[in-house]
Image: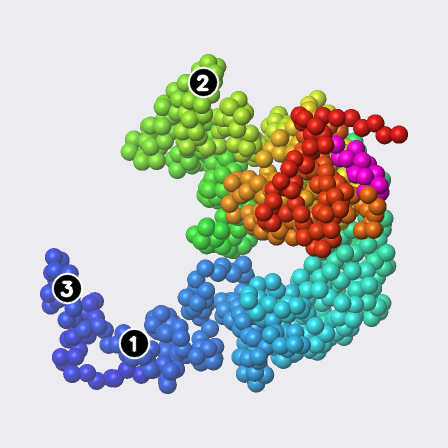
Amino acid sequence: MKYPNTLDLNTYRAYMCARHLNRDKNRQLDAINLDWDLNVPEPLKILCLKAIADSWMTVPYFRELPLCEDRQYLLDLLDLNFPLETLCSRVRSDAFWKRAFHHRWRTFVPIEVGTKPWIRIYLEQHLSEMVEHLKPTDYDQEGIKKIVDLCSPFVRELRIKRLQPSLSDNSDHIPLDVVLANLRRLQRISLTYDVKDVGHNFFLGCATITEMDVKLMTQGLERCSELTEFRLHSSKLEPTMMKRISAALGKGCPNLRTIAFPHCRCGDIGLRAFCEPIKPNSFPNVREVVLTNNFLSPESVQELTRRLRHRQIERLDLRLNPILTEGASLIMMSVFYMPLQELNLSCCSIDEQIEEYLLMLIRFNYTIKRFDISSNRLSPAMGERLLQRVYENKTLQQFDLRNTDISYDVRAIIDEVILENRDPHSAETASQAEIDRHLEIGRDFLARGQLSDALTHYHAAVEGDPENYLTYFKRGTVYFALGKAKFAISDFTRVLELKPDFTAARAQRGSVYLKMGDFENAEMDLMIVLRMDPHHPEANMHFSRIGPARDQWVLCVDLMERGDFNTAIALLTQLLEVCPWSVPIREARAQMYLRIGDRMAAVSDFRSVNRLSHDSTDGYYQLSRILYDIGDSGTALKEIRECLKLDPEHKDCFPLYKKLKKVDKVYVEGQQAQEEQRYADCIAAGEKLVKLEPDVPMIVYNGKQLLCSCLVKEEQFTSAVSRCREALDIYSDPEVMCDRAEALIGAEMYDEAIAQYREALEINDNLQRAKDGIEQAQRVQKQAERRDYYKILGVKRSATKQEIVKAYRKAAQKWHPDNFQGDEKKMAEKKFIDVAAAKEVLTDPEKRKQFDAGQDPLDPEAGRNGFGGGNPFHHFHHGSPFQFKFHFT
């Protein structure tokens, strides 16, 4: 760019640089008036750059500017809405593309910051977003190709988290052949076809990958010669699809290093179909195989190990597959033929029989650095044997044994041994640029409130530079925000070891101590802070709370000892506002809730105690006991297992575990039988549960609730009415009331059924089942008002009087109320009245004639009372109609 080489005197004086003036004598400065320079024109160069920025669409000057500072100033002025084609061809500045990225995606933090230029980050995100939001009906091949060609020189990675489902009958998504085939430098791709948030346009199959989707995708993959990583997530893959993908990757991607099909449910047949096209020289550079949650069995693992053996596989992930011990042993034997560094067999239904293979692997393998076998069943005694082998292994750096029945203490020792293995490797410290990158990303995540993501990057920064006190302080602040008090204390203590005069860390540690209820340490830290800075606002605020909180805790202890539980709970609740992380205070309130009978509140507090203390066996026992007492045997069993993980021989937890395991097994069997409509098995389980634990009312209730529901389904209405009443005597549940009402309908006791439904509505006025039940009972009652007297006595219409009397005597003996108790007696009384009425009508020729003609002679609406104007029990002489005995010969 060229500037004018001649200027008139007035212009020269107006734009003369400050360094040419004699101490700014010619400038009229006014320090009080902020608008003194409004009429002073800007430098000519600035005006020129603004003019270039305004007309940049027609005259895109950039490289023509000779000075870097002028180019940077122009980039700061450029409108971010200029066409992408113009910007990509003219601008490469990292600062500009970073500004453009944050302007467009304000809340998104890319994890690649510091490792690749911002123009690449921008265009990769732009292309991914365009593909994700493009509907199949709007697909324009020429337009797509134009955008892909623009992005192709820069895009190395494509992450497609979802694809818009088709709303047509074929269910195909947008074709990916044009996109993949024209990304000539693509190295990593991650795809997900199976989406769940299709809204009101959902129809069966709209979120499923189709054969056409796979065909077009593989046509594009065959031209991705630089591809090193292929990931296909959460998409149900058929065997033909797996075979097509395998053939395409083997043909067109010779540099492939990662193959991943997480959560694709391909199954054994799908995996065998994928392996079928693989030849001995296929995939020579593959280093990572991920097959998470694909329903693989030991048979498919055998095929997989045969294909992978003697290949340079460094990472194998088979978690969430039911490969059992058989499949896991095949994997562990094959490890010796591969330079495997990471193996994940988490949650693979492995049992104790794997232990010998596991010991051999730990003892003799010297390549695996990370091994995950969590959430499998290993014996508690296995921990000591593993510990001996881990001492001998100097390679292993991470060994996950959570949820394996190995005790917490043994796992902690194993972690310490592995940490010693990790120390020599930590000498390979990260570069300062890498550390700065983690700190920058962590700061961005922290600003957006994504604390867990921020913590991950601060971990990496601490490992890279373990002597930087500021990094520990930032990580401790994140721990503080996440409520992880012990970790926060540890980091703040490390900060003070590295820099004892760092007041901010000491103030933060003092506030954490206060929240934990450690008044002595909190007071000590805050006093040191106030001695160094008497006006420190945070320290003054927290210090002023220590004395009253300590006094209130003493008062609470006194109230608890004197038995004033409600007042103690109120004061403890106030105290927890100041000390929310205090285990003793929260545990004390839990005990007070138990004293006043509020078990659900106690459950909440004991959960908090266990979360805060991490190793509270007594807390887990108390929580499990309470949950058992309120009938939640399944959750109680989970909590007691946590206790046993900390101490397998705990004197209270182990006996309770054995009882819980037995009770919960019966209850679960009953529920499963009920869901599978095996009502006889459900009834048997309910009876067994009632007998198994008669001293815990809510467990008895669970058993009787099963009996109530399943007896109704079996149409054993008399027994169901009785069992439902026994369950309701323990706990008034509206659903059980509805079950009992259904049993009453089955027993033709319609008024009682309607009353039971209404009682359920008094507890839950929105219970639709009760509302529908009332309508059904009224409708059935109306239909049943006309009694069939022949059916009641079980005789034919042609029966003689002698046959009718004989049937009457038999029915009267069966339904005599003196033979029944409780609800069954009420039902028997109704049946007995019907039997008596049937005998009265059918033994009287005139009444029988009326009934045969379609008119009920005892119908109240016909102007008669319930028994034809007389006493239906007149033949029983005087007194109660039920006080007699039959003497049949």
Element type where label 3 sits in the image: loop
* Image quarter in which the C terminus is found: top right
* Whole-percent x, y for residue 534 in the image: 29, 31
Which residue, as the protein is rendered here, is positioned at the far front? 846
**Numbered label attached to residue 868:** none
In terms of sequence position, does the residue under pointer 2 or pointer 3 come before the other?
Answer: 3
Q: Nearer the viewer, residue 128 or 693?
A: 693
Q: Magenta part of the protein: which range?
A: 802-817
* Image quarter in which the N terminus is found: bottom left
Q: Nearer the viewer, residue 274 or 287?
A: 274
Residue 18 higher or lower than 770, as above or below: below
Look at mark 2 in the image and give the residue it sits on: 564
Q: CA distance from mark 2 to mark 3?
A: 71 Å
**Numbered label attached to residue 35:** 3
- The residue located at (77%, 42%) in the rendering is 843
Residue 93 higher or lower than 834, as above or below: below
Which residue, as the protein is rendered here, is positioned at the far right? 889
Res 773 visible = no
